[in-house]
Image (cartoon, rainbow, N blue to C red):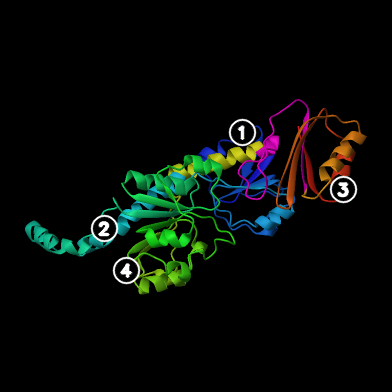
């Protein structure tokens, strides 16, 4: 029986993926096998020694101590793409709100509640509507920075609206490239994106290389009248630089899902309360995806969509499976196999991969090794963990 500690409200459709025969789920456990969470800020001392894996029902994992988990041999799973459509639709709404005086118009109509005569109301509206005049999206240029699961959907959506689309992503994966329309113009420099775009939409993870990526120097290249949209992560944008660009007229508007005190109350800024993935469908998709990943890991040792471990999938075979985490140093695999060979334990199948400082192996053997054999493997210098999967 595997015990799953849930630290947030997780969609029922995700929790239902765990069979009652093999799993027990609760918000309190002394010795859980895995942790399932959403936005809970997980501290290192909240992770018991028994934890084998952590699942985040969402794409961002900045609320999880990744480095410490890696040192302890704990893979952290996320759900890239599961909430992509929800974010894409909100970006579409943001661009429409940023192109016309929709918000301002709605607010203005709200001030006319005291007028009871319909003819008078229509006369006032007809006279005042010109102040809410905007522009259409068709024919404008959208620059998309980050062309992964969400960015590629945003690019495709903009094309269907009749926009020109240019994209920047130096880390574009092969899978993402296949998803991307050939009509998206690839740009090699961020400065070019800002210089040619009427709208710029950010879709990047928070990394050392992306923190404060949108800074004063980059914004100095902005095309006059540009609208910047940030539905990715707050840390990507230097908010002081954005305020400076708004004050200087370089940016026409800033629309973001990450409110900050210095932005509240500015008429050129539209702030949303972090609702990019707040749809029933997105929450269900994320919960289902992460539940399936945790199950596959706990039951088969397979790793899909981990932010700190290599992707490793080994089809089931006869016998017993060993899952071993060790430092990514030379000769480790040979030492592990030597322990098995010394005990005349035959290897049926195996797969070994590494990522950064971590190496991970799945080894299928004919029969379950004794505790003494497992302890020999665990005692090897560099081995972080070794478990048996029946």
CA separation in Å, label 2 and label 4: 13 Å
* Disc 3: which residue: 379
Q: Residue at x 73, y 50 (%)?
A: 358
Quarter of the image containing the N terminus? top right
Report if the CB atoms under discs 1 and 3 are less than 8 Å apart: no
> x, y (%) of residue 341?
89, 34
Is residue 232 covered in magenta? no
Res 62 → quadrant:
bottom right
Residue 344, percent from left and from top: 91, 31
Looking at the rendering, the stretch of residues picked out in magenta corresponds to 297-326
Outermost residue on the right side: it is 342
Give the residue number, with chain letter if any, for mark 1: 19
Q: Is residue 278 left or right of residue 36?
A: left
Q: Earlier in the sequence, mark 3 or mark 2?
A: 2
The residue beneath circle 2 is 102
Task: Give the dominant element type of the magenta stretch: helix, strand or loop.
Answer: loop
Say whether disc 2 or disc 4 marks the residue closer to the N-terminus. 2
Q: Position of residue 217 (x, y in %)?
A: 47, 70
- Of the numbered discs 1 and 3, the one sitting upstream in the chain is 1
Cα distance, mark 1 to mark 2? 48 Å
Residue at the spot 57% in from the left edge and 35% down from the top edge: 17
């Amino acid at each position: 029986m595997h015990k799953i500690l849930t630290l947030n409200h997780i969609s029922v459709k995700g929790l239902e993926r765990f069979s009652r025969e093999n799993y027990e789920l609760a918000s309190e456990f002394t010795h859980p096998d895995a942790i399932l969470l959403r936005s809970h800020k997980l501290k290192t001392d909240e992770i018991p020694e028994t934890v084998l894996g952590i699942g985040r029902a969402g794409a961002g994992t900045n609320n999880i101590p990744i480095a410490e988990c890696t040192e302890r041999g704990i893979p952290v799973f996320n759900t890239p793409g599961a909430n992509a459509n929800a974010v894409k639709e909100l970006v579409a709404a943001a661009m429409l709100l940023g192109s016309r005086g929709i918000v301002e118009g709605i607010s203005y109509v709200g001030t006319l509640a005291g007028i009871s005569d319909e003819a008078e109301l229509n006369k006032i509206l007809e006279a005042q509507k010109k102040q809410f005049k905007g522009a259409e999206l068709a024919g404008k240029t959208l620059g998309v920075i980050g062309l992964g699961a969400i960015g590629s959907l945003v690019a495709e959506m903009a094309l269907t609206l009749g926009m020109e689309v240019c994209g920047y992503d130096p880390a574009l994966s092969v899978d993402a490239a296949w998803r991307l329309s050939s009509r998206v113009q690839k740009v090699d420099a961020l400065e070019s994106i800002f210089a040619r775009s009427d709208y710029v939409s950010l879709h990047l993870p928070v990394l050392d290389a992306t923190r404060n990526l949108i800074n004063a120097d980059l914004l100095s290249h902005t095309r006059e009248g540009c609208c910047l949209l940030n539905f990715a992560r707050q840390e990507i944008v230097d908010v002081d630089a954005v305020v400076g660009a708004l004050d200087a007229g370089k940016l026409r508007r800033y629309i973001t899902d990450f409110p900050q005190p210095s932005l509240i109350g500015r008429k050129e800024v539209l702030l949303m309360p972090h609702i990019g993935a707040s749809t029933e469908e997105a929450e269900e998709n994320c919960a289902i995806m992460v539940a399936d990943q945790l199950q596959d890991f706990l039951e088969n040792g397979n790793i899909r969509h981990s932010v700190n471990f290599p992707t490793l999938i080994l089809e089931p075979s006869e016998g017993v499976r060993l899952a071993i985490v060790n430092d990514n140093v030379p000769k480790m695999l040979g030492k592990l196999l030597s322990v098995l060979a010394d005990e005349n334990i035959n290897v049926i199948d195996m797969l070994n991969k590494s990522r950064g400082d971590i190496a991970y192996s799945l080894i299928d053997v004919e029969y379950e090794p004794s505790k003494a054999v497992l302890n020999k493997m665990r005692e090897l210098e560099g081995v972080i963990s070794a478990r048996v999967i029946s």
